[in-house]
């Protein structure tokens, strides 16, 4: 599911505001292997072998202080050092020197990448907002899954919402980017909210909660996708 580049504005101690990147779903090696295989036509396992070989060779070149400002028009490769010792001649081991290698995307590559980003604000940090600690499927009592047409319970903080206000509630973002609001709710408290997943919702979903706090509707996303599972006894 592609939600775009997630970020959060935050007060800047020097005045004004800055922003911070927000982590979405963690990427897996299998996902990368499949994506590179689709682009190159190579088998996924071969893609992984080639990538690991390139990375090992970069480390090997770094052992002799080799570097590059821009390999393949994408990344720079730089030796790094640091550490702290009492005297200038006390750096005797690679651990003392904190020898390392840094790989970073080149500025040109980043500037080109930025042009295609779809930004998604996660709301101003540093102010009160709903928080989601867990989502439990009531049918299976398992976290981060749901049964179509079944109940889920959100636990966290500042979850007290008005189920009759269309701007508030529990919202499901589907894989195609469409958003469906849960229309039926059970118990709602400051720390817990229960809702019925609409029948039309299917596949992996991202759950968002929106509540009215101190004069405005504020929203938060759950950290993980919810995966659809069959109802108990249905397979």
Image (cartoon, helix red, strand yellow):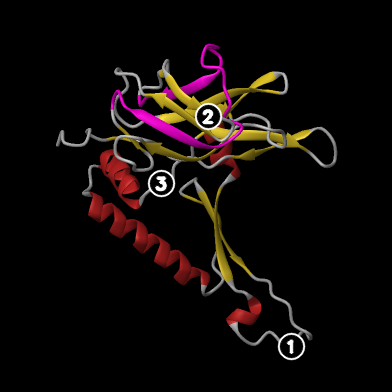
Q: CA distance from mark 2 to mark 3?
A: 18 Å
> Does residue 154 belong to the magenta stretch?
yes
- Closer to the camera in the image, 191 or 168: 191
Q: Position of residue 84 (x, y in %)?
A: 73, 77
Residue 15: image quadrant is: top right
Residue 120: image quadrant is: top right
- Magenta residues span 148-175
Taking the image as shown, residue 24 lies to the left or right of residue 27, namely right
> Label 1: which residue?
89
Residue 27 is tagged as 3
Q: Position of residue 16 (x, y in %)?
A: 81, 32
- Closer to the camera in the image, 218 or 109: 218
> Label 2: which residue?
117
Tell me, yes or no, whether the two marked residues, 2 and 3, touch with CB atoms within 8 Å: no
Q: Earlier in the sequence, mark 3 or mark 1?
A: 3
- Badge 1 marks a residue whose secondary structure is loop
Taking the image as shown, residue 57 lies to the left or right of residue 228, namely right
Tell me, yes or no, whether the two marked residues, 1 and 2, touch with CB atoms within 8 Å: no
Q: Earlier in the sequence, mark 2 or mark 3?
A: 3
Q: CA distance from mark 1 to mark 2?
A: 48 Å
Residue lying furthest right = 14
- Badge 2 marks a residue whose secondary structure is loop
Q: Position of residue 117 (x, y in %)?
A: 52, 29
Q: Residue at x 55, y 34 (%)?
A: 6
Q: For the C terminus, give its image quadrant.
A: top left
């Amino acid at each position: 599911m592609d939600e775009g580049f997630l970020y959060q504005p935050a007060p800047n101690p020097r005045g004004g505001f800055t922003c911070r990147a927000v982590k979405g779903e963690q990427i897996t090696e299998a996902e990368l292997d499949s994506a590179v295989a689709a682009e190159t036509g190579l088998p996924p396992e071969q893609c992984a072998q080639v990538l690991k070989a390139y990375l090992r060779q970069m480390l090997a070149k770094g052992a002799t202080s080799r570097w590059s400002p821009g390999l393949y028009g994408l990344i720079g490769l730089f030796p790094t050092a640091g550490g702290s010792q009492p005297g200038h001649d006390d750096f005797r081991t690679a651990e003392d020197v904190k020898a390392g290698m840094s790989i970073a995307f080149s500025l040109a590559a980043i500037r080109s990448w930025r042009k295609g980003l779809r930004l998604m604000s996660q709301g101003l940090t540093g102010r009160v907002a709903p928080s989601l600690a867990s989502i439990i499927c009531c049918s299976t009592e398992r976290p981060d899954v749901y049964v179509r047409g079944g109940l889920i319970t959100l636990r966290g903080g500042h979850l007290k919402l008005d189920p009759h206000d269309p701007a508030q509630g529990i919202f499901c973002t589907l894989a195609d980017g469409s958003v469906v609001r849960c229309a039926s709710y059970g118990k709602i408290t400051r720390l817990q909210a229960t809702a019925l997943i609409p029948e039309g919702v299917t596949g992996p979903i991202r759950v968002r909660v929106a509540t009215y706090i101190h004069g405005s509707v504020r929203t938060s996303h759950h950290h993980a996708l919810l995966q659809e599972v069959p109802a108990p006894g249905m397979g």
